[in-house]
Amino acid sequence: MLNKIIAFSIRNKLIVGMMVLALILFGVYNVSKLPIDAVPDITNNQVLVITPSPSLGAADIERLITFPIEQSTINIPGLIEQRSFSRFGLSLVTIVFDDNTDVYWARQQVSERLLQVQSQIPPSLGTPVMGPVTTGLGEIFQYVVKPKPGYEHKFDAMELRTIQDWIVRRQLLGTPGVADVSSFGGKLKQYEIAVNYDKLKSYNLTISDIFSALEKNNQNTGGAYIEKGPAVLFIRSEGLVKSQDDINNIMIKSLPDGTPVSIRDVAVVQLGAATRYGAVTYNDEGEVAGAVVMMLKGANSSKVIKNVTTVQLSPLPIG
């Protein structure tokens, strides 16, 4: 058999040469398509349950949140171990499954158990949510948001963070292979209501009255409809707060003589920022905002990075 193959190759050099050339081209093509990953993900199947609760200490977090979550998920098939971390204002529960368990099936099982455990955790303490479908090796790309030269004084740290959260992050989330975009740096924009206690007391009001007024006056409502000839007029009331003036005009209560008491009468509405525990700087150019792109578990990092770097961000108005 081997002699026949050798004899055929000697007699048909052109055909053999063309076949060898085709094999080389086929090999080169397949090498270019190999999913080569510089840092392969060797993390086991994990589901992370996160519960923020800013008002509780570590001991209460462990007793009221972490322990019920661990108890409700302990008997899921395929579970290997549970690890938890309770600190001030935050509960982290890591549920590890064996390699034969599909990660999306595991997340479905955890989600069903979390629906059951929510009845044991008071709503005011926090709602358990699952982390993104990523791992500790999923941090594949970091970037910063900074103004171009000449515009440094036009955008402060708060505006840079707002651009990152409402424009850049929202468009990157639609990139194939991206699980989440975790923002950091800058100042997280908030509307702050600084209450004057003396004025509040003079109107015989409490902080609870302000909370209740803000909650009731910051929502849209819908009604039925009115038939007017061949047309139908739908009834709708818009009550979502859109500016600081809208907050100032929210009525808290009416005095016995009919005079309305608004937020502006007992407090000052202004822009503020969430409590910061650090800052992000870029080279020697001052403070910036930034983010880390998290890759989906099992995706190819080089391909996802290419997808992220080729995204064409379209400008959007900041709401």
Image (cartoon, rainbow, N blue to C red):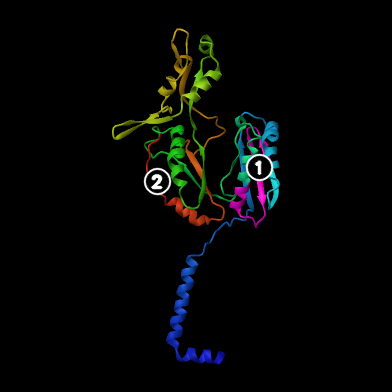
- Residue 52 vertical position relative to residue 261 in the rendered view, above or below: below
Residue 251 x %, y %: 45, 18
- Residue 191 vertical position relative to residue 301 in the rendered view, above or below: above
Q: Which mark is residue 313?
A: 2
**Residue found at x 42% / y 19%:** 249
Q: Which mark is residue 187?
A: none
Who is closer to the viewer here, 221 or 241?
221
What number of labels is visible? 2
| Residue 194 shown left or right of residue 232 in the figure | right
At mark 1, the secondary structure is strand
Q: Which residue is mark 1?
A: 93
Who is closer to the viewer here, 6 or 117?
117
Who is closer to the viewer here, 95 or 172?
95
**Residue found at x 46% / y 21%:** 269
Q: Amino acid at mark 1?
A: Val
**Residue found at x 70% / y 34%:** 63
**Residue found at x 62% / y 44%:** 112
What is the span of residues highlighted in magenta in the rendered image? 84-109
